[in-house]
Amino acid sequence: MKFICLGYCDESKFEDMAPEEFQEKMDECFAYDDELRRGGHFLGGEALQSVRDSVALELVNGQVSVIDGPFVETKEQLGGILLLEARDLNHAIALMSKHPGIQFGHWEIRPADETINALVAERDAKFSVHPS
C-alpha cells in the first residue's frame, strides 16, 4: 500500500538553530530516508519552503481569490511530504515513528487513494502518447 506522510514542523525551532546543528539534523533525516530506500519503502518526497512564502486559492463569490499565507493559526505548518510503501497502516506507523523528522513536529500518515490515482494515471498516459 502507498501512504502519503505529511511532515508538520514548528518553523520557529529552526530560527535559533546554528547552521551546523541544522545540517546535522538534516543528515539524520537523510540517513533514515536511505534506510527506507534500502527496504523498498521510500517512494519519493518533497521538502517545502516556508509557509511565509505560500499562497492559497479560494473561490469567493464565483471568483478565484489569492490569499497570502500563513492560513491556519497553528505553530506547526506542513514542511514536507514523504511517499511511503508499507504493508498496512500499522507498518507505516512503525516505519515513520523512527524518522528523525518527528523531533520537529508530527507526521500525518494517510493511505493513498488508489482508485482516484488509477484514474489520474489513465489520463496521464493519454498525454504521454506522442504521434509519430
Image (spheres, rainbow, N blue to C red):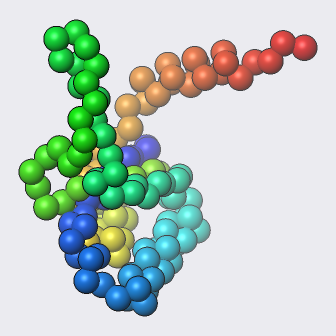
Q: Is residue 80 left or right of residue 13?
A: right
Q: Nearer the viewer, residue 36 or 23?
A: 23
Q: Work out whether 42 lies above or below 35.
A: above
Residue 28 visible here: no
Where is residue 99, by image quadrant? bottom left
**Quadrant position of the C terminus in the picture:** top right
Residue at 46% from the left image edge and 28% from the top image edge:
117
Residue at 58% from the left image edge and 68% from the top image edge:
38
Q: Is residue 13 left or right of residue 101?
A: left
Residue 130 is situated, as x and y percent measured from the top left of the image, at: 80, 18
Residue 42 is situated, as x and y percent measured from the top left of the image, at: 51, 58
Residue 111 is situated, as x and y percent measured from the top left of the image, at: 34, 41
Residue 21 is situated, as x and y percent measured from the top left of the image, at: 37, 88
Q: Is residue 84 left or right of residue 39?
A: left
**Quadrant position of the N terminus in the picture:** top left
Q: Work out whether 18 lies above or below 50.
A: below
Residue 127 visible here: yes
In the image, farthest residue toward the right: 132
In the image, farthest residue toward the left: 73
Q: Nearer the viewer, residue 88 or 129?
A: 129
